[in-house]
Amino acid sequence: MIDNFQKLAGNEHIKRGLEISSFGRHKITIIDSFDLKKYIEDAYVSIGGNLDNLTVIKPCPCGNLNNPSKMCNCSTARVTKYYYWSVIQEAFKDVHLVLETSAVRYKDIENTGKNYEDANSVLKRMKACMEEISILKINEHSNELLKKAVQMLGFTLNQYDIIVSVARTIARLDDAGETRCEHFSEAIQYQTSDILQGDFIRRCPNV
Ligand SMILES: [Zn+2]
């Protein structure tokens, strides 16, 4: 039987984000254009996630933005206002990971869903990594990468702290022994949503 975690087949980046969030107790916000909220919440709980750390929001007031099979009727002003208020209303405040769902191909679920990792194996992996209690040191190359990213992408001090903490979680999940460039690169990706920069224009329909 396919479990809730496997039902997110085709949204591997979302599953990865949920695992990082659950493992490190990181706050995660997912922008969902494909009505996956229930699957996402169930999957998160099935791998030990606390729903207080998870926010799933619609991409726009009507919910259809970015969904190629549906029509979004929202005006630019409405979408901008929606994101403005979402930011104010905590969906994006101090969030550690921001992700967006992709369209699900039903053949992923029907045919190959069973080939994807289930919640139990994820839990087992997380448990094994949890026994490792040492604090991972940051290697020198990663420090350089982080410094450049902070300068180029204009991260705040708060975002810097968030990136370091998420990178450490990823390194622990990888059983890496130290926090390396690839862990920082991945953590940085979760902080680069245009919404976090206050840039909502790309999201507006007909712009
Ligand atoms: Zn809309």
Image (cartoon, rainbow, N blue to C red):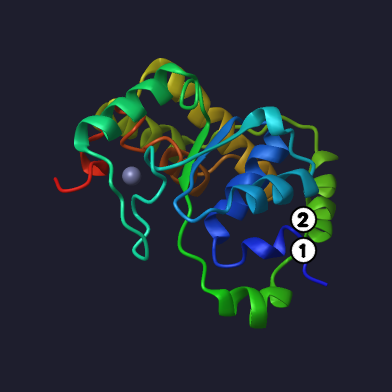
Q: Which mark, residue 122?
A: 2
Please state the horizontal and vertical placement of residue 21, each as a whole percent of the image.
64, 38
Given the image, on which type of amino acid does mark 1 rest?
Answer: Asp
The answer to whether residue 52 of the structure is visible from this angle is yes
Residue placed most toward the observer, 117 or 103? 103
Given the image, on which type of amino acid does mark 2 rest?
Answer: Val
Quarter of the image that includes the N terminus: bottom right
* Residue at image coords 47%, 18%: 89
* Residue at image coords 70%, 33%: 51
Under circle 2, the secondary element is helix
* Residue at image coords 34%, 50%: 65
Q: Which residue is mark 1?
A: 118
Vertically, is 67 above or below 145? below
| CB contact under 8 Å: marks 2 and 1 | yes
Q: Which mark, residue 89?
A: none
Indicate the quadrant where residue 106 lies: bottom right
Name the quadrant where ligand 1 sits. top left
Q: Residues within 10 Å of mark 1 (few under 14, many from 20)?
A: many
The answer to whether 3 appears left or right of 19 in the picture is right
Please state the horizontal and vertical placement of residue 96, each as a whole percent of the image.
53, 31
Vertically, is 169 above or below 173? above
Please state the horizontal and vertical placement of residue 67, each as a whole percent of the image.
37, 58
